[in-house]
Image: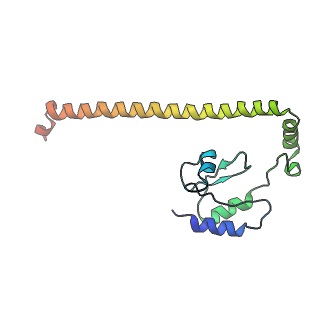
Amino acid sequence: KDMKPAWDALMEEFRDDDTVLVGEVDCVGSGKAKCKELDIKAYPQVKYGDPNNLEDYKGGRDLPSLQKFAQDLNPICGPDRLDWCDNKRKRQVQGYMDLLPSELDAKIQEQEQSLAAAQQEVEDALQKLQKDYAEARRRKEFKVQEIRQTGGLGLMK
């Protein structure tokens, strides 16, 4: 379903909002590098959240669903907006801010490696499933051919 009219209306509705940014990136043209960075492979894809840690939106694509989702978004706490954080998050953010840049980089790299490992696990499982499926189809085709040629099914019908 084409969600462009709904998206355009949503962008207009939130144009002057200080806490919600509704925008779009041309993944085919000038925004190709950004889309690669965000791992966008299908269009349209809606993401939300912290610009440094965007999440995939999985809700409805009609204007009322998009409006409700955008209206229900909470401001995102972070180093620049500690006033938007609850006490637990404030302590967590402050702990990261207190780290040396090299320590923070190491923690980020560790988390990114964990994400990459999880993604690789899914890709490996998909490859195995595809291989198993191809082998099952091959066996089925062989069995169908065998039944047709020597099993006499055609003669029985």
Instruction: Tell me which corner region of the image, top left, top right, bottom left or bottom right, holds residue 151.
Output: top left
The color scheme shown is: rainbow
- In the figure, is residue 11 to the left or right of 98? left
Expressed as whole percent of the image width and height from the top left, the position of residue 30 reads: 60, 56
Taking the image as shown, residue 9 lies to the left or right of residue 86, namely: left
Percent x, y for residue 116?
62, 33
- The residue depicted at 68 percent of the width and 34 percent of the height is 112
Task: Decide if residue 77 is on the left or right side of residue 109.
Answer: right
| Viewer-nearest residue: 154 or 8 | 8
Image quadrant where residue 37 sits: top right
Q: Position of residue 124 (x, y in %)?
A: 51, 31
Residue 13: quadrant of the picture:
bottom right
- Residue at point 53% right, 51% down? 42
What residue lies at 69% left-to-right and 62% top-to-bottom?
Answer: 68
Report the number of numbered marks.
0
Image point 82% across, 47% down: which residue? Answer: 78
Quarter holding the C terminus is top left
State whether residue 124 is above or below residue 33.
Answer: above
**In-front residue for pair 104/77:** 104
- Tell which residue pokes out farthest to the left in this image: 155
User: 155 or 46: nearer the eye?
Assistant: 46
Q: Where residue 104 sits in the image (x, y, percent)? A: 80, 33
